C-alpha cells in the first residue's frame, strides 16, 4: 500500500509547572530533510531528536517543533537587585525624587534582568522522546490515510488508461488498411512505372513503421505493473515514478506512429491522465 509524504502529528504533555507540545509535519521531498525548532535548553539533544525522526521516516521535508510553556509560580528570569539599587542610587544623586519613579527609570536600564539557565532534566527528556514517538506514529497514520486517497485516484486513472488502450486496439485493426489505401492513391501514377515487387516491398517497410503492436503490448504490461507495485507491502514512490515514465514513453510512441486523427485524440486523453498521475506522484513516499 502506498503512503503519502504529507502528514502531521502532535502530542501534548502536561508536567508539573510546564506544558510541553511536540509537533511533526511532513511535506514532499526527494530525500529526508529535517528542520528542528527546539528551546535552547534542548539544543544539545537536537541530534538525538533528528535520529529518532530518521529511524521512523524515510523521505520528506520534516518540520519538528518542541514548545515548552512554563505555567508554574517560579520564573527563570529574575531582577538583578544589586544592579537596580546601584542605578537608583546614581539616579538619586543626579536628581533626587520619588523612590517608585527612580525604580521605574532604573528598570529600563541594561542588565536589570538576568535569566537563569535551566538545567536539562533527563527524566523530562525521556518523556519528550516518548511524546515524539507518539507524534511520529500519528503522522504515519496520517500518511497512510492520505495514501489510500492517492491509491484510489491512481487506480481510477490507470483503469481509464486501460480503457483508452482498448479503444486504440479496436481502431488499430482497420488503421493500417486505411493508411495503405491512402498511400496507394497517393502514388498511383508512380506505381505504373515501378517494379511491382519492389514497390510492394517498399510499401510493407513503410507500413511497418506505423505498426504499434509492440507498443500496445508493453503499455498494457506497464499499466498492470503499476497496479501490482501499488499493492506491494512497502510504499515505493520512486519505482512508481519510473513506471509512469515508461508508460509515457509508450504513449508518445503510439502517438507518433498513429497517423490517424481519431487515434491521436485518444493519445491526447491518455497523456492528460498520465500527467495527472505524475502530479500526484510527487506526494507518494
Image (cartoon, rainbow, N blue to C red):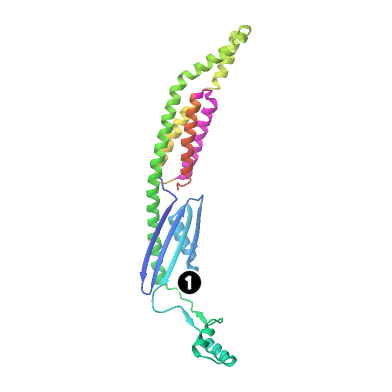
Toward which corner of the image does residue 150 lie, by quadrant?
Answer: top left
Q: Which residue is mark 1?
A: 41
Q: Is residue 100 above or below residue 23?
A: below
Q: Which residue is at a point 39% across and 37% down the rendered structure image?
A: 156
Residue lying farthest top? 192
91 up-or-down from 173: above or below: below
Residue 67 at x, y = what percent?
44, 67
Q: For this rendering, which residue is in front, 199 or 20?
A: 20
Residue 92 visible (yes or no): yes
Residue at 47% across, 30% down: 218
Q: Nearer the viewer, residue 38 or 80?
A: 80
In the displayed structure, does residue 20 sit left or right of residue 33?
left
Instruction: Give the residue drawn at x 42%, y 61%.
Output: 23
The magenta-colored residue range is 236-261
Q: In the rendered view, tell whether residue 127 sits above or below residue 179.
A: below
Give the quarter of the image for residue 155. top left
Asked if the magenta segment contains residue 54, the reply would be no
Q: Is residue 212 visible?
A: no
User: How many numbered dots are placed on residues in this image?
Assistant: 1
Where, quadrant-wise, is the N terminus in this rendering? top left
On the image, the x and y values in percent for residue 202 come to 59, 15
- In the rendered image, the residue lying farthest to the right is 193
Q: Please tell me whether mark 1 sits on a helix, a strand or a loop.
A: helix
Measured from the top left, where is residue 11 in percent x and y? 38, 62
**Residue 253 part of the magenta-drawn span:** yes
**Magenta segment, principal secondary structure?**
helix
For the residue carrying disc 1, how many other residues have a C-alpha within 10 Å: few (<14), some (14-19), or many (20+)? few
Amino acid at each position: 500500500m502506498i503512503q503519502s509524504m504529507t502528514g502531521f502529528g502532535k502530542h501534548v504533555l502536561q508536567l508539573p509547572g510546564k506544558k510541553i507540545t511536540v509537533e511533526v509535519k511532513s511535506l514532499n521531498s526527494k530525500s529526508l530533510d529535517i528542520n528542528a525548532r527546539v528551546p535552547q535548553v534542548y539544543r544539545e539533544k537536537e541530534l538525538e531528536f533528528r535520529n529518532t525522526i530518521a529511524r521512523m521516516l524515510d523521505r520528506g521535508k520534516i518540520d519538528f517543533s518542541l514548545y515548552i510553556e512554563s505555567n508554574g509560580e517560579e520564573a527563570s528570569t529574575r531582577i538583578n537587585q544589586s544592579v537596580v539599587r546601584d542605578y537608583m542610587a546614581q539616579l538619586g544623586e543626579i536628581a533626587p525624587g520619588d523612590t517608585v519613579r527612580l525604580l521605574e527609570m532604573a528598570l529600563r536600564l541594561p542588565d536589570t534582568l538576568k535569566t537563569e539557565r535551566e538545567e536539562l532534566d533527563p527524566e523530562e527528556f525521556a518523556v519528550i522522546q516518548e511524546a515524539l514517538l507518539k507524534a511520529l506514529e500519528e503522522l504515519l497514520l496520517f500518511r497512510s490515510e492520505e495514501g489510500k486517497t492517492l491509491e484510489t485516484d491512481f487506480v481510477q486513472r490507470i483503469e481509464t488508461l486501460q480503457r483508452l488502450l482498448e479503444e486504440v486496439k479496436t481502431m488499430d485493426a482497420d488503421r493500417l488498411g486505411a493508411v495503405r489505401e491512402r498511400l496507394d492513391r497517393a502514388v498511383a501514377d508512380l506505381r505504373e512505372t515501378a517494379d511491382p515487387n519492389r514497390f510492394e516491398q517498399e510499401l510493407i517497410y513503410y507500413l511497418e513503421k506505423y505498426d504499434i503492436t509492440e507498443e500496445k503490448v508493453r503499455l498494457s504490461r506497464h499499466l498492470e505493473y503499476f497496479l501490482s507495485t501499488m499493492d506491494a507491502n512497502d510504499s515505493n514512490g520512486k519505482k512508481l515514478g519510473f513506471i509512469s515514465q515508461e508508460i509515457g514513453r509508450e504513449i508518445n510512441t503510439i502517438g507518433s506512429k498513429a497517423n490517424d486523427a481519431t487515434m491521436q485524440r485518444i493519445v491526447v486523453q491518455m497523456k492528460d491522465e498520465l500527467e495527472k498521475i505524475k502530479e500526484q506522484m510527487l506526494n507518494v513516499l
